[in-house]
Amino acid sequence: MTGLIRRPGFWAALVCLGLCAGLLLAWSCAGRGLESQREAERWQAGEDSFAQVSAFVSEDAALTDAAVMGAHTRVTEELSALLGSPEAAEAAWTDAWCAESRTSVTGGFNTRQARVLCTGGDWFAFHPLDVEYGWYYAPYDLMDGLAVLDELLAWQLFGAADVTGMEVLVNGHTCTVAGVVSVPEAEREAYGDEPAIFVSYGFFSRVTGETPPVTCYEAALPEAVRGYAQDTVSRALGLGEDMCELRRNTDRFSFGRSLAVMSELPQRSQRTGRIYYPFWENAARAAESRAGLYAAGTLTAALWPAGYGVYWAVRGIRRLRRR
């Protein structure tokens, strides 16, 4: 044993093991804070397996709120056949969607151009932004004239952050501020510095006369067989690969998936279609790339200690056989 410790290869193996442990720790932290990727975990109850799926849709598909509600109905019908009743199916899953636009927002004595995220379904369950004041508006709220401001817009309009209950004008129509939010640290860089307001899709359509195309649809549903959730959402939306990109969020940061990302790096850096990612997906993809680098580094760092250990194990076995 003393002779082994004196060998340079032994210390090189220890250094590699330390590096391997550090990279493994970095890999395990790569997806931390990305709550937008964990709705299936929050929704899951008992031992049932759930999966979260995201569909990123091209604006050219012109997917409307009404079309998404049709997809919701089709998913519920498919789950009804498995669970025995529409009521059980409706209670077994959740979904959300959003569209983006821009409009003028007036509050206090100020008017600003702001990004508008028009949300549908249980959007804030999928994206639990940090609430600074007030709270989110509820899905299918009977009072649809509610809005959530980000902190930047609240300061620009009112010169303060605690503006819950105050009124703002969206395209000249009054709505009440339900809450003020900030973006989690893990998504802040991808979010950017443009002020934003969150309103229901129905409210925005009513006050502007526009039907902005839905560009992101998300669902968390039971999955007894891997791939079922993604296939179900794909069938419900009925869009081709050129118009819709599906992503399985569940297990996105598993070690095997992180290694697979490394083989996809050339394709990931080239965007040739007209599908654009929202800020939370851009943040997740950046974290996914980092996780891939850490996983590949962990595997590489483990090669020397593994080989060194095998070498000495084989050598020891041979010595025993000679005796």
Image: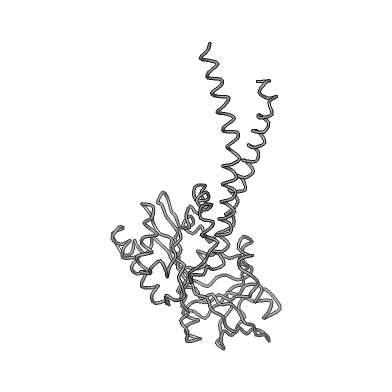
Residue 219 percent across, percent down from the top left? 43, 63
Residue 106 placement: quadrant: bottom right
Residue 66 percent across, percent down from the top left? 39, 77
Q: Nearer the viewer, residue 60 or 197?
A: 60
Q: Residue at x 53, y 58 (%)?
A: 266
Q: Is residue 272 left or right of residue 301?
A: left
Q: Residue at x 46, y 79 (%)?
A: 202
Residue extending furthest toward the top:
323
Residue 208 percent across, percent down from the top left? 50, 86
Residue 319 percent across, percent down from the top left? 55, 16
Q: Is residue 190 left or right of residue 121?
A: right
Residue 287 placement: quadrant: bottom right
Q: Nearer the viewer, residue 270 or 202?
A: 270
For the N terminus, the quadrant is top right
Residue 227 placement: quadrant: bottom left
135 shown above or below 48: below
105 shown above or below 249: below
Q: Nearer the viewer, residue 91 or 228?
A: 228
Q: Is residue 83 left or right of residue 307?
A: left
